[in-house]
Image (spheres, grey):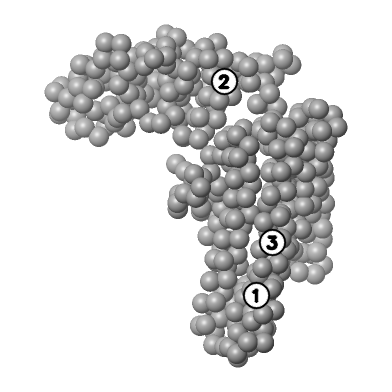
Amino acid sequence: MTRAIRIGRLFGVDIEIDYTWFIVFFLVAALLATGWFSRQLPGISPGLRWLVGFATAALFFLSVLLHELSHSLVAIRSGLRISGITLFLFGGVSKMADEPKSARVEFLMAIAGPAASLLLAALFLLLSHLLRGAPGGHLLATVFQWLGLMNGSLAVFNLVPGFPLDGGRLLRAGLWAATHSLTESTRIASSFGQVIGFLMIVVGVLLALTHDLSALWLALIGWFLVQAAQQSYQHVIFRQSLLGVPVSSVMTTQVDWVPAAATLDQVVHEHVMVRSHPAFPVLDNTSLLGLLSLTDIRHVPQERWPYVTAAQVVPPLAEGQTIPPTADAWDALVSMGAGGFGRLLVTRDGALLGIISRTDVMRLLHRRMELGV
């Protein structure tokens, strides 16, 4: 089950909110209402402070979204696939299905986010300055001042040279241009990210013990950076291992398929109870109709199983549920992740050639990693 809620689509990019985002959203709103606005606007009512706090928090996360969207738009213009943007506990992330094709593309993608945040910071601070002396403009000026300061801080923090932060990506772009090796440049940049993350953890814990418990947030961000740096390097290693390996060399060709005219009673007793597969392709002669899962069968009352055929129940194939045999194994893994599929049907001209599962790909990856190829 996904932890993210899809809230819309901008410029062809799906926008999602992870459940953890609600935690930090309410936390930011509460800190604004009881802290910043309490000090800057002591004359307004508590109810109005909370209302302005929530509105300001929403504008801030809209700024985070624009930061990530700038990365995504540069990536799309460079021919890369972006499966979506997710806002979560630590901000936002653009989910790239591909690695940049060159150091130049990496540089442009990395710099786009901080540049967008700096532009927003300048805009908000300018609005704050213009409204500060206007009649009745003090409240909005205070809101824009905070947004300007936070967007500036967001830009500066993201320029820290620790991968996968934007500064780490800029570092990787420079190393890539110098070494001509994406793998080596990622290894070095992710090492910087881990070192910086560990330092943040140590500083955060020490400050929490001696000064302020809120410094634990710094330690938490440091822990996230360490994990993200390690996973990013593994991601590149996995991708390099799977690129150039065709799906046809990994797929299972002996496919247990179900005839379209078979009743659900036959499917259950002749296939489900015999095999351990969670789903079965349904064929009408050589035409592939879809993938019949146990959930699809359970939706039909058991007393009707002898009278309902597989063709009547099987859902149509979802977008991305099939893949050609010439595609890379990496593309198969990316498609499974993007669509939430455990397996893909390998087809050519509508004919079923085989099935490739996540287990198949991971088994191949483990074998190649063991052999060092």
Q: Quadrant of the C terminus?
A: top right
Looking at the image, can residue 94 be seen? no
Query: Mark 2 to mark 3: distance in Å?
Result: 40 Å
Helix, strand or loop at mark 3? helix
Which of the two discs, 3 and 1, labels the residue nearer the N terminus? 3
The answer for how far apart the CA atoms under marks 3 and 1 are is 12 Å
Q: Is residue 265 rendered to the left or right of residue 286?
A: left
Q: Amino acid at mark 1?
A: Leu
Q: Position of residue 200 (x, y in %)?
A: 79, 54
Q: Say which amino acid is labelled 3.
A: Leu
Residue 202 visible in the snapshot: yes
Q: Amino acid at mark 2?
A: Ala
Q: Is residue 353 left or right of residue 370?
A: left
Q: Which mark is residue 119?
A: 3
What percent of the width, then of the height, locates residue 269? 26, 17
The image quarter in which residue 354 lies: top left
Q: Can you identify the residue that label 2 sits on?
A: 329
Which structural element holds mark 1? Answer: helix
Above or below residue 227? Residue 349 is above
Q: Residue at x 26, y 20 (%)?
A: 268
* Residue nearest the observer in this picture, 122 or 160: 122
Residue under numbered circle 1 = 127
For label 1, the crowd category at 10 Å Cα-Cα, with few meaning under 14, some 14 to 19 and many 20 or more, is some
Check the picture and name the quadrant holding the N terminus: top left
Query: Which residue is depicted at the point 51% across and 83% down?
Result: 47
Q: Secondary structure at mark 2?
A: helix
Front tag of 2 and 3: 3
- How many neighbours does mark 3 have within 10 angstroms: few (below 14), some (14-19), or many (20 or more)? some
Of 105 and 203, which appears nearest the observer?
A: 105
Q: Vertical placement of 316 versus 95: above or below? A: above
